[in-house]
Image (spheres, rainbow, N blue to C red):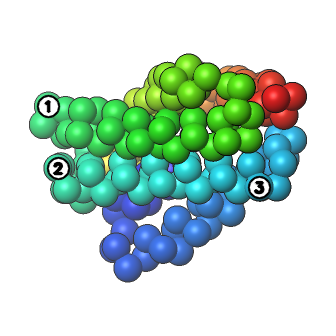
Amino acid sequence: VLFRSLLVRERREWVWLLASGCVANWVANLWGGGSFLLSLGFAIVNITECLLAAWAARRYAGASLTLTRLREIFGFVVMSAVPACAVSGLLGAWLVTFIAPETPYWSVWRVWLVADVLGLLLIAPIPVSWTTSGAMLFRLMTRWRLLETVVSIGLVGGLSIVVSLQSANSIGSM
């Protein structure tokens, strides 16, 4: 959602969007059991990733990213998502290995990269597509399709919370 907000808002509004996203991410990390500083560090790394991805996507595909043209999809995946996640993986792995020096840096980086690329590729297209054609989609959607959509989003959200809480527990035990 923050990624899409950065795409459609003026750059002068980005500071406020990023600040609110950072606070929300920090609180979510704290709620998941992370320490004060580690949660703040993860929030800063995640917001940096979102900033880099949005900046690169706007630079390559423009502010009206709809993911309906091959150029936009290529720009989103190759020019935006993968490089932003690679950079955030470097920062996140540094943060984890700074807190727990015995942790292998490149193993953490690989996990961070894969997890964040998958997250961006699976989740970011939803608000992008809904803001471009969402109103018409909901008018045309049957009750069963709407129920299927709500249940699917609920399952993805629920699984994300379970995975996040398990990840927070494993990081907290380092």
Residue beneath label 3, please?
37
Query: Which of pointers 1 and 3 indicates the residue nearer the eye?
Result: 3
Left or right? Give the position of 135 relative to 102: left
Left or right? Give the position of 55 relative to 117: left
Amino acid of disc 1 = Leu
Taking the spot 18% from the left edge, 49% from the top edge, the residue there is 61
Of callouts 3 and 2, the N-terminal one: 3
Of callouts 1 and 3, the N-terminal one: 3
Instruction: Give coordinates of residue 34: x percent, y percent.
Output: 82, 44
Query: Which of pointers 1 and 2 indicates the residue nearer the eye?
Result: 2
Residue 138 in view in this figure: no
Query: Is the Cβ of the residue at disc 1 closer than 8 Å to that at disc 3?
Result: no
Query: Foreground residue, 11 or 41?
Result: 41
Query: Foreground residue, 62 or 15?
Result: 15
Residue beneath label 1, please?
70
Taking the spot 57% from the left edge, 28% from the top edge, the residue there is 105
Left or right? Give the position of 96 relative to 139: right
Taking the spot 73% from the left edge, 41% from the top edge, the residue there is 99
How far is disc 3 from disc 2 in space, using C-alphas? 34 Å
